[in-house]
Image (cartoon, coloured by chain):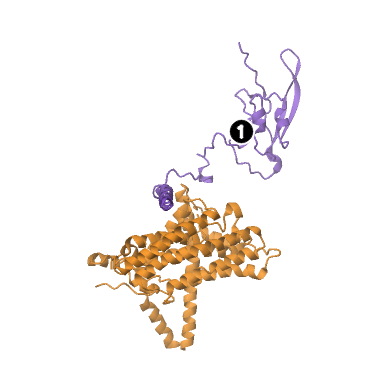
Amino acid sequence: MNSVVRYFTDIYKGVTSLWTGMKVTGKYFISPGEIVTEQYPENRATLKMEDRFKGEVIMPHDENNQHKCTGCGICEVNCPNGSIEIITKKVPNEQGKMVRAIDKHIYHLSMCTFCELCIKTCPFDAITWGQDFEHAVFDRTRLTRVLNRPGSSLKKKEVKS
Amino acid sequence: MILEIYSFSTLTSSIDEGLNSVMAPWLVTLTEFVIVGIVFLLFYALLGLFLVYLERKVCAVIQNRIGPNRVGKWGMFQTIADLIKLLMKELITIKNADKFLFNLAPFIVIITSFMAIAALPFAKGLQAIDLNIGIFYVMAVSSLGVVGILIAGWSSNSKYSLIGAMRSGAQIISYELSVGLSLLAIVIFSGSMQLSTIVESQADGWWIFKGHIPALFAFVLYLIAATAEINRGPFDLAEAESELTAGFHTEYSGIKFAFFFLAEYINMFIVAAIATTLFLGGWMPLHIGGWEGFNQIMDYIPSIVWFFGKTFVIIYIIMWFKWTFPRLRIDQLLNLEWKYLLPLNLMNIVLISFVVLIGLYFK
């Protein structure tokens, strides 16, 4: 007798839980919520990508054309497929001593797998993700970019008092 | 009754007389075969295209998306564009496949759905063939489709296809019982297997109302079992794309794949049409016994509109199932049939026989 009762309560529970699911989708059919579809090429002007979107690696520069990259090469070492090449140069500092500085931070977008290891390991937060994703070009060489702008220099750290 | 529902038999008989006056009788029969065949082919193609479009729009709305909206206004020509694409695709021949069966399978699937659609009463007097064992015929023919699926899976020489086909076989053989038993409910109520007689018996109320609880019960069981029989979600184990890539039609390409695809949608229409004919009165307008005024207002709506309106409501319910529930496992699927649907159906048949015997339903 107990098993018969369980059989029918199982059916009842199953039907009610299925009905709960159908109510949700039925509600959306009658009154759709916010439409999540992005009408892509038309909405280019208003398109807002998510903050965590991985479009490309960029190096932010401030208004004085200064960046935070010291040319240490940690990103180059960590890149699993060699998308980053660091070319450094020696420049004199205030004391007249020759120190290492970045000459060219070369980034091969065509090889990048967007794993984020370079950005995660950068000790100076010099590189970050950009939101641009329209990378289609007619020539593959145009996907190789120099991230530091010409004439840019290392931003001096504020001396902590 | 002041207004007679327009009967298509006046149109068809006038065509018949017109042909008879100019041709020999055997030629008339042949010409009529050809006409009916062309009409069904056109109907089939248009219906398939529309159902694919409808499915995509319904699922888009349920999932808060827009759905196809690029080709034509509201993406109306999307499925036509898809069809042209499929027509132009290469038909890949599979190494070590059984060539003859591989090419035969899509035709078996599509011919069985053609045969089933022939017996459906679309409107008053609009029925290609009115067999006196109509339901029996439709059930028998629609379950032949699984032969095509099994052949497709077997001849493809692919493990995914074979697993999909075997699943489909197990599924259809078991769910066929439930479909048959739930249709038997209406056969008991109306006392006939002829589809036109069943529709006529609902002139003063549809069976789902006249047969109250047991008929409603049989209707729900029929919907579940029929959804399983046409291999649609949540019972789409035969083509479970996440496990079997595409199940039995993995190796098919181009128009042969389109045949399977089309047959699946037409089968959905067929089961919805059978549910309409048996439970919801077919082309019969909504009549309530005794309310003459109300019945006459309902008669002004043409019978073909009634039929397609009801059928599309059922189709919407089947789509609603698909886009709500996750896919079942094969053991859950067989449990559902053999432990729940079949015993409940048998109990329901006994209940209905009892109800009919002592006359406990609305006459």
From this viewpoint, is residue B151 visible?
A: yes
Which residue in the rendered view is the most extreme toward the top? A161
Query: What residue do we see at 34% from left, 74% from top?
Result: B7
Colour of chain A in the rendered structure image? purple
Tell which subunit mark 1 falls on: A
On the image, the x and y values in percent for residue A152 come to: 67, 25
Relative to A56, B304 lies left or right: left
Q: Nearer the viewer, residue B152 or B354?
A: B354
Query: What residue do we see at 23% from left, 67% from top?
Result: B292
Q: Which residue is mark 1?
A: A129
Above or below, B10 relative to A6: below
On the image, the x and y values in percent for residue A33 come to: 42, 44
From this viewpoint, is residue B83 visible?
A: no
Colour of chain B in the rendered structure image? orange
Relative to B282, B158 lies left or right: right
On the image, the x and y values in percent for residue B262 come to: 53, 64
Above or below, B313 relative to B5: above
On the image, the x and y values in percent for residue B194 come to: 40, 74
Query: What residue do we see at 66% from left, 60% from top?
Result: B158
Q: Nearer the viewer, residue B115 or A66?
A: B115
- Residue type at mark 1 is Trp
Kindly indicate the quadrant of the structure image that contains residue B218. bottom left
Question: Which quadrant of the figure contains the C terminus of chain B?
Answer: bottom left
Query: What residue do we see at 31% from left, 69% from top?
Result: B203
